[in-house]
Image: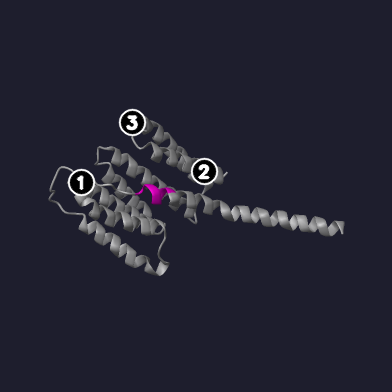
């Protein structure tokens, strides 16, 4: 009887440990996905142009919510490229047109990165960063934090993921945040961003 109880306890402990390990990455990924869904949105300064912005917003949300199967990924990549093309006009109607076009194209890059495999997503994230760095506004900072979260998500999902590399990325993001936090207007975004980084860091320990 005593031997049976010991064996049962051992099985429960092993099962619980395996369950915890399998849930850890999922918990970190869900935290990032929730952040992306909540904050990856472009609110146009001109209400008459919000419909065009919402087309990109809804597409990005669909991608982050994973409302698709792997079989439909090629079609979604085509849609992202079409959206990029639609937002690549060279003539601007007003002073804000450059900002709106640049932001929408950057979001297309983000969607492409999220949809892409390990050998392509980094190029799209680099293009998104290059694009956003041309903007001198809070919007630049907001969207760059989104790019960081997509990169962290892809790193966590990489079959070559290394704990030390993920820790290095988190520390890098935290250091970058210190340099911009004081003058950054999106307080809720900052708090959510810091919480996700902390949660992911605690998850991989």
Q: Inspect the magenta stretch and tell me whether residue 50 lies in it.
A: no
Q: Name the residue under label 3.
A: 183
Estimate the spatial distance between the alpha carbons at disc 3 and disc 1, rounded to whole Å. Answer: 24 Å
Horizontal and vertical percent position of residue 77: 32, 62
Of the numbered discs in the image, which one, if any, rests on residue 46?
1
Q: What residue do we see at 39% from left, 41% from top?
A: 189
Magenta residue span: 35-40
Taking depth in this image into account, of 151 and 143 the one nearest to the observer is 143
**Residue at the image point whose x is 33% and y is 35% from the top:** 185
Query: Can residue 204 be seen from the camera position used here?
Result: no
Please tell me in which quadrant of the rendered image residue 55 appears.
bottom left
**Residue 143 screen position, x and y as percent:** 33, 44
Q: Is residue 205 above or below residue 56?
A: above
Majority secondary structure of magenta residues: helix
Give residue 21's position: percent from left, percent from top: 60, 53
Local packing at callout 2 (Cα closer than 10 Å; few below 14, some 14-19, many 20+) is some
Q: Is residue 195 visible from the viewing direction of this image?
A: yes
The quarter of the image holding the C terminus is top right
Residue 119 left/right relative to 90: right
Question: Mark 2 vs mark 3: which is more N-terminal?
Answer: 3
- Disc 2: which residue: 199
Q: Where is residue 1 in the image (x, y as percent from the top left)?
A: 87, 59
**Element under label 1?**
loop
Residue appearing at x 50%, y 40% in the figure? 198
């Amino acid at each position: 009887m005593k031997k049976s109880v010991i064996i049962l306890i051992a099985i429960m402990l092993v099962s619980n440990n395996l369950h915890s390990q399998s849930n850890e990455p999922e918990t970190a990924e869900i935290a990032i996905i929730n952040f992306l869904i909540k904050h990856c949105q472009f609110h146009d300064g001109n209400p008459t142009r919000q419909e065009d912005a919402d087309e990109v917003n809804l597409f990005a949300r669909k991608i982050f919510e994973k409302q698709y199967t792997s079989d439909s990924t090629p079609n979604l990549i085509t849609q992202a490229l079409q959206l990029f093309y639609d937002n690549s006009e060279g003539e601007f109607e007003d002073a804000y047109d450059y900002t709106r076009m640049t932001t929408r194209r950057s979001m297309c890059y983000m969607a492409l990165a999220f949809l892409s495999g390990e050998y392509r997503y980094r190029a799209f994230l680099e293009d998104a960063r290059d694009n956003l760095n041309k903007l001198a506004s809070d919007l630049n900072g907001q969207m760059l934090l989104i790019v960081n979260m997509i990169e962290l998500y892809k790193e966590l999902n990489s079959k070559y993921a290394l704990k030390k590399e993920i820790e290095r990325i988190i520390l890098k993001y935290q250091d970058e945040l210190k340099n911009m936090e004081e003058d950054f207007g999106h307080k809720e975004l900052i708090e959510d961003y810091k919480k996700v980084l902390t949660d992911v860091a605690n998850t991989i320990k």
